[in-house]
């Protein structure tokens, strides 16, 4: 299972709110809800997140068996 717990930690460290993700980075509220629920998201969304946060995929997602 892929979980996005690290995303929220990284956002907090960088001072980025979900509002900024939605309004500035173009990530809609439905996608934010899916991330919170650890649901499937598109790779282009992961790319947007990494670009917006200036981080790598390991900073926002983690695989847990």
Image (cartoon, helix red, strand yellow):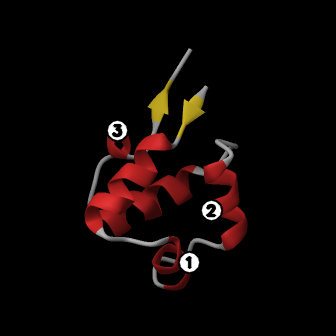
Query: Which residue is located at x 44 percent, y 53 percent?
Result: 8
Report whether 61 appears left or right of 15. Answer: right
Give the tally of numbered discs. Answer: 3
Farthest-out residue, top: 65
Q: Which residue is mark 1?
A: 22
**In the image shown, does 7 or 45 lie closer to the viewer?**
7
Assess whether mark 1 and mark 2 are in contact (beta carbons under 8 angstroms): yes
Query: Which residue is located at x 55 percent, y 50 percent?
Result: 43
**In the image shown, does 39 or 10 lie closer to the viewer?**
10
Earlier in the chain: of badge 3 and badge 1, it is 1
On the image, which quarter does residue 61 sit in?
top left
Query: Which residue is located at x 31 percent, y 70 percent?
Result: 15
Q: Which residue is mark 2?
A: 32
* Mark 3 Cα-neighbour bin, 10 Å: few <14, some 14–19, many ≥20: few
Quadrant holding the N terminus = top right
Earlier in the chain: of badge 2 and badge 1, it is 1
Instruction: Determine the secondary structure under disc 3.
Output: helix
* Mark 1 Cα-neighbour bin, 10 Å: few <14, some 14–19, many ≥20: some
The location of residue 59, given as percent across then percent down, is 33, 44
Q: CA distance from mark 2 to mark 1?
A: 8 Å
Instruction: Determine the secondary structure under disc 2.
Output: helix
Q: Which residue is mark 3?
A: 58
The location of residue 41, given as percent across then percent down, is 64, 49
Q: CA distance from mark 2 to mark 3?
A: 18 Å
Q: Is residue 50 above or below residue 52?
A: above
Report whether 56 appears left or right of 21. Answer: left
Q: CA distance from mark 3 to mark 1?
A: 21 Å
């Amino acid at each position: 299972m892929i979980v996005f717990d690290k995303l929220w930690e990284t956002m907090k460290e960088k001072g980025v709110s979900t509002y900024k993700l939605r309004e500035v980075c173009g990530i809609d509220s439905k996608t934010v809800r899916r991330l919170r629920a650890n649901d499937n998201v598109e790779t282009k969304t992961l790319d947007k997140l990494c670009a917006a946060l200036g981080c790598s995929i390991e900073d926002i997602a983690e695989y847990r068996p």
